[in-house]
Amino acid sequence: MHHKGNHIITSQIEHPAVLEVCHFLETEGFEITYLPVDEFGLVSAADVAAAVKKESILISIMHANNEVGTIQPLQEISKLSRERGILLHTDAAQSIGKIPTDISELGVDLLSIAGHKIYAPKGIGALYIREGVQLENFMHGAGQEAGRRAGTENVLEIVGLGKACEIAKRDMEGNTRQMQTTRDRLYVGLKKGCQKVKLNGHPEKRLPNTLNLSFQGLEANRILEKISVAVAASAGAACHSDTVEISHVLEAMGVPLDWAKGTLRLTTGRMTTGTDIDDAAEVISAAVKRLRSSKSYIDINLY
């Protein structure tokens, strides 16, 4: 690819599946531009345009963020990429099955998905390649996948992915409505049950299932310790004895440390019920109240 150019444009909030590849490519002589995002986690199409160079060969911007759910302006970016003759890849692992993901409307050249995000078997995924796009072989050996990736295909999981996509398309409208209703019910319940709660991500341009909340002055791992028996969630920060590791997404969004360190990511699914939501809101609210009434919370907030 070096003979075509060596410049790639991506964002600071991409999934490690993209960021770590970019870091590796830097060791191979590629130049990577990591675009900033605003306070809602949005990439600016104008920033993409400003980053383009004559050596630019690829733009990779995710469709929707995996931590805060913010949906990126891909159609604006794709218009720019076509005008400049630059390939556009999007990571659609989080968005497919939750919001419309029409390749023609998005205008992308490459689109990757992960099966388990739409209830397909784990370990299967797919990469859409627009007709006419020539890629280097991913794995050398035999001639499977039109020579792009050697290895015997996992037919069972491929069929499972195909069926999961079929179901996701068929039921998307109802599933989207269900996920958004339960997500918003959880948000209302937690705002009612807790004080000093902050929503991260765009309030409107966001996946219907994603709720990323910061609880000011608390540590996410302490909350998880209290709720893990009843509620599955992930932390936006890892707090250790002498350091706090903030999610690269929250850091890029500029979330203040006293908020970021107490961040939880909660997601709803097509099988989540109202009872599930009410139970989760009660468990999390109780944990937050207990932690805020403890001596450790008081000590932390004295400094």
Image (cartoon, rainbow, N blue to C red):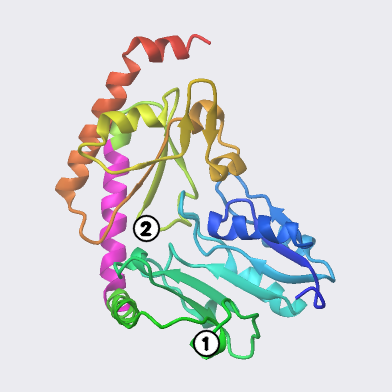
Left or right relative to 270: residue 97: right
Q: Which residues are magenta?
A: 169-189
Magenta stretch holds residue 181: yes
Q: Position of residue 216 (x, y in %)?
A: 44, 26
Give the secondary structure at mark 1: loop
Could you tell me which residue is drawn at 36 percent across and 79 percent down?
A: 154
In the image, 303: left or right of 298? right
> Which-is-in-front pick, marks 1 and 2?
1
User: Alpha carbon of mark 1 to alpha carbon of mark 2: how far?
Assistant: 41 Å
87 above or below 219?
A: below
| Identity, as a three-letter code, of the amino acid under mark 1 | Ala
Residue at horizontal 51%, vertical 82%?
Answer: 150
Q: Is residue 85 magenta?
A: no
Q: Position of residue 7 (x, y in %)?
A: 77, 65
Quadrant for residue 79, please give it.
Answer: bottom right
The residue singled out by tag 2 in the image is 208
Determine contact: label 1, label 2, CB under 8 Å: no
Q: Categorize mark 2 by other alpha carbons within 10 Å: few (<14), some (14-19), many (20+).
A: many
Q: Which numbered marker is on residue 142?
A: 1
Compared with 201, 207 (above or below) is: below
The secondary structure type at the circle numbered 2 is loop
Image label count? 2
Task: Confirm whether residue 107 shows in the render.
Answer: no
Q: Up-down: is 26 above or below 261?
A: below
Could you tell which of marks 1 and 2 lies nearer the N-terminus? 1
Please state, as top left, top right, bottom left or bottom right, where the N terminus lies in the image: bottom right
Residue at 49% x, 9% y is 302
Res. 191 image quadrant: top left
The residue type indicated by label 2 comes to: Pro
Q: Nearer the viewer, residue 148 or 180?
A: 148
Magenta highlight: main SS? helix
What x and y, as percent, mark residue 12?
63, 51
